[in-house]
Image (cartoon, rainbow, N blue to C red):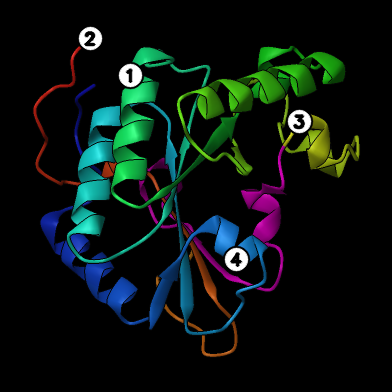
Amino acid sequence: MTGDRSFSGHDLARLEGFIYGHARTITCSEFHEGDHRPDAIMLRHDVDNDPEQAVLFAQWEADRDIRSTYFLLPTASYWPRAARDTALALAAMGHEVGVHNDALCAAEGDLDRALALLSDWATEMRSWGLTIRGCADHGGVGWKNTDMWRVHLQPLSAAGLEYEAYLLHQQETNYISDNRGTWRAPMRRRSDRPTHMLIHPEHWPVDRPQRMAA
């Protein structure tokens, strides 16, 4: 999928400087396991529409020894074949992979069906040879997917998972997101807490790779 990028090359350079302003980059799983030191930045990517751009952004990170977590969307048009190729490429670069959770929307509010869907998606991704520990809510239509945990109070273990990324950032982090192609909070560091940064690779002007096979 192609399209205009919301950010410029200048923005990309600024992002790189901000990331390097932290001593360490960590995955969502590492934060979940208790690494909450203030010098860390937990980098996370929601892959909504463009798996090719995610692979290229992941390579940009790997070239700079930056580690992060990528969440792939099972209700997207790229699922499952391109999702599998993408997930394996991301994991080969040393990044964590998880499920971008659109289950409650896909199940039209049916909680039992949503939990089954999310579990099935995680199981399918594990069948590709991946370790899948967490999910991240997708802003779907009609229902809030995080209501599975915040309102209905289901345990993540009901879907075979350990963490939800949107709940992680409530644990006293400095949360920064580029949702909808613009920063939703100032891109600045806090000395008293770790940073949780959400980046959508499709918004960023990294040169595109060869198209993956259909």
Instruction: Determine whether the residue tagged by mark 1 lies in a helix, strand or loop.
Output: helix
Q: In x, y percent, where is residue 133?
A: 62, 44
How far is mark 3 from mark 4, CA to CA? 20 Å
Look at mark 2 in the image and give the residue it sits on: 214
Per the rendering, the mark at residue 113 is: none
**Horizontal relation, residue 145 to residue 208: left or right:** right
Look at mark 3 in the image and give the residue it sits on: 159
Look at mark 1 in the image and give the residue it sits on: 82
Chain-order first, disc 2 or disc 4: 4
How far is mark 3 from mark 2, CA to CA? 30 Å
Q: Please name the amino acid that badge 1 sits on.
A: Ala
Range drawn in magenta: 161-184
Instruction: Determine whether the residue tagged by mark 4 lies in a helix, strand or loop.
Output: helix
Instruction: Determine whether the residue tagged by mark 3 lies in a helix, strand or loop.
Output: helix
Q: Residue at x 24, y 36 (%)?
A: 53
Chain-order first, disc 1 or disc 4: 4
> Which of the 4 quarters of the picture holds residue 1?
top left
Q: Residue at x 35, y 33 (%)?
A: 88
Look at mark 4 in the image and give the residue it sits on: 31
Q: In this picture, is 156 found above or below 20? A: above
Looking at the image, which is closer to me, 92 or 13? 92
Q: Please name the amino acid that badge 3 sits on.
A: Ala
Q: Please name the amino acid that badge 4 sits on.
A: Phe
Chain-order first, disc 3 or disc 2: 3
Q: In x, y percent, where is residue 214?
A: 23, 9
Chain-order first, disc 2 or disc 1: 1
Circles 2, 1 touching at the beta carbon (< 8 Å): yes
